[in-house]
Image (spheres, rainbow, N blue to C red):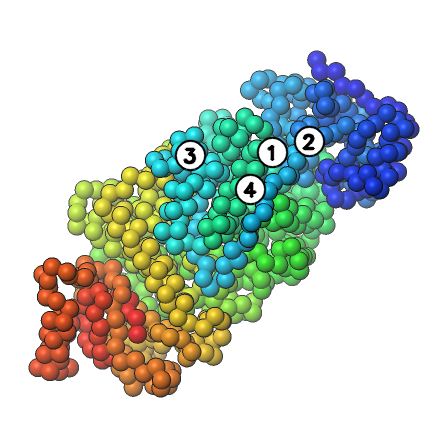
Amino acid sequence: MIRFRQEAALSIAEAQGRLSHPYPLGISPVNASHGVVPKFHDHGVTDAVNVSVYAPGLNAVDVVYTDAAGQWRRFPLIENTDGVFHGMVPELRFGARYAFWEGSAELPANGQLLLDPYGRAIVRDHSLGGEDDDAAYVNEYVSPAFDWSGDFAPRVPWRNTVIYEAHVKGLTQLHPDVPEHLRGTYAGLASDAMIGHLKKLGVTTVQLLPIHFHTDEPHLQELGMPNYWGYNTLGFFAPHTEYGSADAQAAGQQAVQAELKGMIKLLHAAGIEVVLDVVFNHTAEGGQDQPALCWRGLGDKQYYRHGHDGRYLDTTGCGNTLNFTDPAVIRMALDSLRYWVEEYHVDGFRFDLAVSLARDENHHFSPRHPFLVAALADSVLANTKLIAEPWDVSMGGWQTGHFPRGFADWNDRYRDTVRDFWVADRGHLNAGGHGESVARLAGCLAGSRDLFAGSGRGTLASINFVTAHDGFTLRDLVSFDRKHNEANGEQNRDGHNHNRSYNHGVEGHTGDTVIRAERLKTQSNVMATLLMSLGVPMITAGDEMGKTQFGNNNAYCQDNELNWLDWSWDDDQRAMFDTTRRMIRLRNDFMGSQPYNYPLQEEQSYLLWFNERGEPMPEHEWSDNQTRVVQLLMGSTDGKLDGLVIMNGRLDATTVTLPRLEELADFRPSRREITTYELRFATSKINYPEDPDGVHGSRMHREVEREILRATQGDDAVFVPRKGEKYMTGDKIRVEGNSILIFRG
């Protein structure tokens, strides 16, 4: 049995009560110059810290902690300020382990005390009781010391941002060029090989799946499976220890945190931002019948949302929902955000199931919710990226486009529309059915203006994505008609059934070269659409290299090769990486040629839509589902160049007339009367590369051929496009079915 020493001296308790303060919550050092520590000297105490916890459900609170000798001590926090228990606690030093318990109550037999909601580190401890395989969670008091000298936040403007959603472990666990002992760790993500990949690809912002300390749900523990994604938070201020390298973990929590900070510092040095996926909507304590680990034991009614019947009101599908009508919960979330910005220098946050954070006392979503207002008004968060997943699973849960200015929203309508046009419709057309017209897709290309206008936001509020961590990968989207989640242990019941996918004729992977080529083209169409659309693109890690999860669209519990990125690429995967890299480069070139405020100044920007005949798109063609060819000319009056995109969503090739000069006169300034379009990219095989061997003739020879064709055939001349070659306004171009061409004008 561990023998706890209860501090009973009333004089010490009274002194710590008078001298302590309720805020900040958690453990905070005491400044000796304030005269606090010397007063403890009279009682034989040489050092002390302020300890504070919001525990409105308890009548008294003790802090249980290890002293310098490693012995457990118990000390009462006798001061109570509006539910916050606080006190000056002696000899609680860096490296000490601690937790809370109800004052004077018998300690639990299993040793599981109540964690500090503000604890900076969480560890497992076997010395408090319980079985060896069921060690208790306790906090550790960790020094924040780290050398941040030379670190500068990249602060990438939204219009230049390309987000890369990734998992710390999954990125590098199989990477052959990452030192073996660093694979799957914070240090591995910051390795030369990984940063080199990110830079070569061209992404600007890494959005990490949760790195807050998280645990595995009971049903997964019974199956012997982990919560790989990490959406089950036990500590909003504590990083997940298991992502630290073995050496860092062996050295202790401060070393793990230093490794994480070093990762961020190295990414910043490479010009790459770090955004954290944060899960404030629920906690790892699960349903109401599960054991208390932290918040439930400290103040269940205050920390969690309840219905009129006293049961949990669960808007998350995870067993509980944090109560963002309580000021203390809002404070906790804001303090956590500020902590990660100030102590870890992160550049932004993506809020999981963000609608649950903005429901009022009647459980209705409000864009003026105090949490949203406070986050936007906070000076520490002012220069960070704030991204909402704008839904949850309860009534009124879909709120895409309704968050306030200052937030960007994951745009699920964009996801569904792009999937429909390029993937699902392809299956319908091949089966003899019909697809949709280009109208909805055009709205997505234009930045979903109609969706965000009501909230006073523009195109840069739209986080455009087609895949994410949950759901099919891009490769699986074009390889499977149905999900294959048997490995998750739920008889394939989990995961979405309606994926807007199409397998191109064979379910799963195949050696058929024709099918593989068509799948690669569809993937390229999706990626090109994502990267040419107005808004902020988000790529899921692995999509740029053709990652597969073998049809599993809910791989949240697969900590294995199913989720880890495979860095041994075949030809198709190399081609996909090249397509993605080139499209990011084209996007950057185009944005760099526009004024700094493009596309926010809409009066100076233009999006011109043309049909396949080169005419402005008539109203009736927008609503015709046979209209699956569109041309988009985009640019600005002060821009240096335009971009022309041609999309053919039909199965067969078609002839497209490039927009004529007279159609552009009202938009382009006279000093920029460009009469040619240079082909920069195509997803079809007719896009011949540069031809140094002269198989298709020299460039000069081909230019002569085109002039002869124009002279002899006039308006009947049709050109087969080739990369790098220029075409006149009004030229007719052959565009293959199910393909995209991108020109620079």
- Earlier residue among tags 4 and 2: 2
Looking at this view, name the residue that lies furthest to the front. Answer: 150
Q: What is the spatial separation of the Cα atoms under label 3 and label 2, in whole angstroms?
A: 29 Å
Q: In the displayed structure, does residue 259 sit left or right of residue 735?
A: right
From this view, report whether residue 266 is shown above or below residue 429: above
Which residue is denoted by mark 2 in the rendering?
94
Give the residue displayed 59% in from the left and 17% down from the top: 131
Q: Give SS at disc 3.
A: loop
The reply to whether dot 3 and dot 4 touch (C-beta < 8 Å) is no
Question: 10 Å neighbourhood of mark 1: few (<14), some, or many (≥20)?
Answer: many
Question: 10 Å neighbourhood of mark 4: few (<14), some, or many (≥20)?
Answer: many
Out of 626 and 29, give the one closest to the viewer: 29
Q: Give SS at disc 2.
A: loop
Which residue is denoted by mark 3 in the rendering?
183
Q: In the displayed structure, does residue 183 sit left or right of residue 313?
A: left
Residue 8 quadrant = top right
Which amino acid is tagged 2?
A: Phe
Find residue 261 and name its label: 4
- Earlier residue among tags 2 and 1: 2
The C terminus: image quadrant: bottom left
